[in-house]
Amino acid sequence: MFRAILRRLFFSQTLILSTCYAMNVLLIVDKIEIKKQSDGLGDQLYFYVIDEKANGKRSAELYPMYPFSYTQSNLVNFKPTVFWKGLVQQDQKVLLTLSVIEREMPPLIADQLCGTIGITLHNDKNQLKALWSVENFAHLLSKDHTLLTQQIDIKHENAEYTLKMHVEVQ
C-alpha cells in the first residue's frame, strides 16, 4: 500500500510538472532603417525596452548602451539583435514596451520620443501568442497584428524609421 501511495504521488507530481511549461522567449530586432532623417545633423537612435509582468514586476534595458546610438552609417552593419529575453510561464502575459528615442544634445535639447510599440506576449496552453500595438499609429502594423513577426514604420516630425522584429521561443 505504501508503494502504491508513493507511485501515485510520484506520477501526479510528474504530470503537474509536465503541464506547467515556461517558455524562454526572445524579442529580436532584425532590421532598423532610417529612411529619412529629422535634421541635417543625422539621427542617433536608441531603444528603451520595459517588460512588465502580471505580478507588477518590471525591468528595463537600453539598446545600445549609453553613450552609443544607432546612426544611418552604423546601421549598414546591423545584425539581428536580441532586445529582450525572458521566461513566460503558462497562462502568463508579459507586456513589452519598446520606445524609439532620438538622442539630441542634452542639456541643450532634450531627447525625443519618436514612437512606442507595445507587445503583449501570452503563453496560452504552451502556445506563444503575440499582440502588437503602436501608440496612435495602429494603421502602421500589418493587417494581422497577432503575427510573431512585424515590420513597423514610425514617422516622427520629418523623420521616418522602419523596424523589422519578431518574437520566438528558444
Image: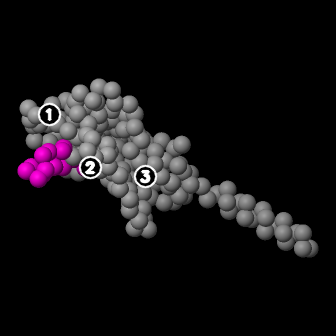
Residue type (three-letter) at the residue carrying disc 2: Ser
**Residue for badge 3:** 121
Label 1 sits on what residue type? Gly
What amino acid type should be assigned to the residue bearing mark 3?
Answer: Leu
In the image, which residues are magenta? 102-118
Q: Nearer the viewer, residue 144 or 22?
A: 22
Q: Quadrant of the C terminus?
A: top right
Residue 99: assigned label: 2
Residue 93 found in image quarter: bottom left
Sequence order check, earlier mark of 1 and 3: 1
Badge 1 density bin: few <14, some 14–19, many ≥20, Cα 10 Å: some
Q: CA distance from mark 1 to mark 3?
A: 34 Å
Gap in angstroms between the C-alphas marked 3 and 2: 17 Å
Badge 1 vs badge 3, beta-carbon distance below 8 Å: no
> Which of marks 2 and 3 precedes in the sequence?
2
As drawn, 106 above or below 56: above
Could one spot residue 84 in this view of the protein?
A: yes
Q: Using the image, tell me which numbered label, if any, was put on residue 90.
A: none
Q: Which residue is mark 1?
A: 42
Measured Cα–Cα span from mark 2 to mark 1: 19 Å
Viewer-side residue, 145 vs 46 = 46
Q: Position of residue 22 (x, y in %)?
A: 56, 55
Above or below, comparing residue 34 to residue 141 in the picture:
above
Foreground pick, 72 / 130: 72
Q: Secondary structure at mark 3?
A: strand
